[in-house]
Image (spheres, rainbow, N blue to C red):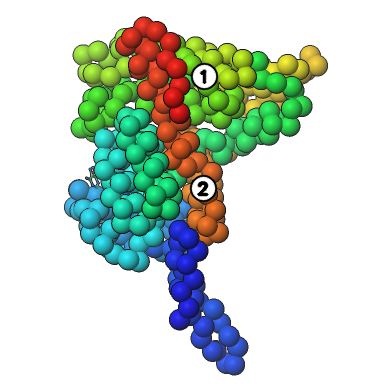
Amino acid sequence: MIIVNINSIIIDVSYITLKGRAKMEVRKIGVAIVGCGAIFQNHITPIIDNKNVDLLYLVDIDEEKVKRLANKYSCNYSVTIDDVLKDERVDVVHILTPHYLHYEMTKKTIMASKNVVLEKPATINLEDANKLMKLSKQKNKQIAVVFQNRYNPSSIEAKKIIESNELGKVKGMKAFITWKRDEDYYNQAYWRGKWDTEGGGLLINQAIHTLDLMRWFGGDIVSLKGHVDTRLLDSVIEVEDTADATIKYKNGAIGIFYGTNNYIDNSSIEIEIICEKGKLIIRDYALWQESNNQIQKIIEDTKGLGGKDYWGSCHKIYIDKVYKKLCRSETVDINIEEGLKTLELVQGIYSSSKENKYYNMRY
Ligand SMILES: NC(=O)c1ccc[n+]([C@@H]2O[C@H](COP(=O)([O-])OP(=O)(O)OC[C@H]3O[C@@H](n4cnc5c(N)ncnc54)[C@H](O)[C@@H]3O)[C@@H](O)[C@H]2O)c1
């Protein structure tokens, strides 16, 4: 047996002579999923479909649920992450637990020399995300933070057009997210709606994807001024249900953000990017381009790929890309540094709202 250490993933290669021909057997990437709640299906489907990946464990504190799911997907189960971290066959751990658990679980996993696929937000405060970034470098293990909406066809095309400079420089951007999270939603899980366990409300849980896209499309951000409020659910949650911000980009562009969880439906997010020679608009799950007095639809987003369409349907594309990168020992597209920078947008709005002044970005 030859052991090939490709930096972050170790692959065992065995040569077996079969009818005189050499056959190479490669050990698959061993995977565990921790947290089997609402987002679980979006992770398990790409994992079981990936021929390079071997699902070894499911973990959840709800023993009845995890046992049933482990039976369905023919793998081991545990009620604690500690068991799977002891198993050398586990190379990657998907962490899909409530926000307040992200830091400790990711830290333990990296300390156990395993890579992490971490659902957003990276952590519930910047200091912890920064510590994870340092630890990931020290231990040479990767933390891939899930922002699947960067892989929506509309996002990919918009980014390409911006980078091609076809429409010139980005001058400004507005982004709206108007979704519905009512009392029932908050009552479904003990950790939602509280600062200690969710780390915030609309911004850290729902709008974080839209803020990530604003950063991805517009580039580095220098400062922002924002405001958060609880307008409808003040008797139900501690955290905000509505927020807005004015964002100053390094290149001089201005971004306007508005988000609320108080709408009566989950509308498609809307992002308008004004460039020197035209406009890009993401609306109704499609990308539109307006230039030379003409508006045309560039591409539509794919829907119905699992989970809820308004979350964005690209978990599979995201997870497949992560495994491709890990197999080649390349850096994942959205690493912990990216997760930290987008988290800073969220935390910057909280801080600015509290102190009623501009927040200057540190990371
Ligand atoms: N990317 C997206 O679009 C998207 C969408 C929804 C949720 N999420 C994220 O996914 C994560 C989970 O959210 P959810 O809505 O699935 O939550 P959930 O409450 O539905 O599920 C969380 C699961 O974790 C389990 N759990 C709690 N403590 C645990 C522990 N100590 N060890 C093991 N399991 C434990 C719970 O029993 C539950 O099954 C969050 O970070 C959330 O923001 C992302």
Q: Is residue 321 found left or right of 103 in the rendered image?
A: right
**How far from the left and from the top, in percent, is residue 277?**
76, 17
Q: Is residue 206 visible?
A: no
The answer to whether 245 is drawn above or below residue 93 in the figure is: above
Q: Residue at x 31, y 59 (%)?
A: 57
Q: Residue at x 54, y 15 (%)?
A: 248
Give the residue at mark 2.
Answer: 332
For marks 1 and 2 on the same chain, the one whose residue lies earlier in the sequence: 1
Q: In this orientation, which residue lies closer to the viewer: 217 or 229? A: 217
Asked if the residues shown at circle 1 and circle 2 are in contact, with their CB atoms under 8 angstroms apart, the answer is no
Q: Is residue 355 found left or right of 339 in the rendered image?
A: left
The image quarter in which residue 196 lies: top left
- Ligand 1, by image quadrant, is top left
- The quadrant of the picture occupied by the N terminus is bottom left
Q: Residue at x 51, y 86 (%)?
A: 16
Within 10 Å of the Cα at label 2, are there few (<14), some (14-19), or many (20+) other Cα atoms? some
Badge number at residue 222:
1
The answer to whether 319 is drawn above or below residue 279 in the figure is: below
As measured in the structure, the alpha-carbon distance from the residue carrying label 1 to the one carrying label 2 is 25 Å
Q: In this orientation, which residue lies closer to the viewer: 299 or 88? A: 88
Q: Is residue 2 found left or right of 68 in the rendered image?
A: right
Circle 1: residue type: Val
The image quarter in which residue 19 lies: bottom right
Establish whether ligand 1 lies closer than 8 Å to the Cβ of label 1. Answer: no
Circle 2: residue type: Val
Q: Residue at x 20, y 48 (%)?
A: 61
Q: Residue furthest right?
A: 292
Q: How many marks?
A: 2
Give the SS element for disc 1. Answer: strand
Give the SS element for disc 2. Answer: loop
- The quadrant of the picture occupied by the C terminus is top left
Q: In this orientation, which residue lies closer to the viewer: 350 or 63? A: 350
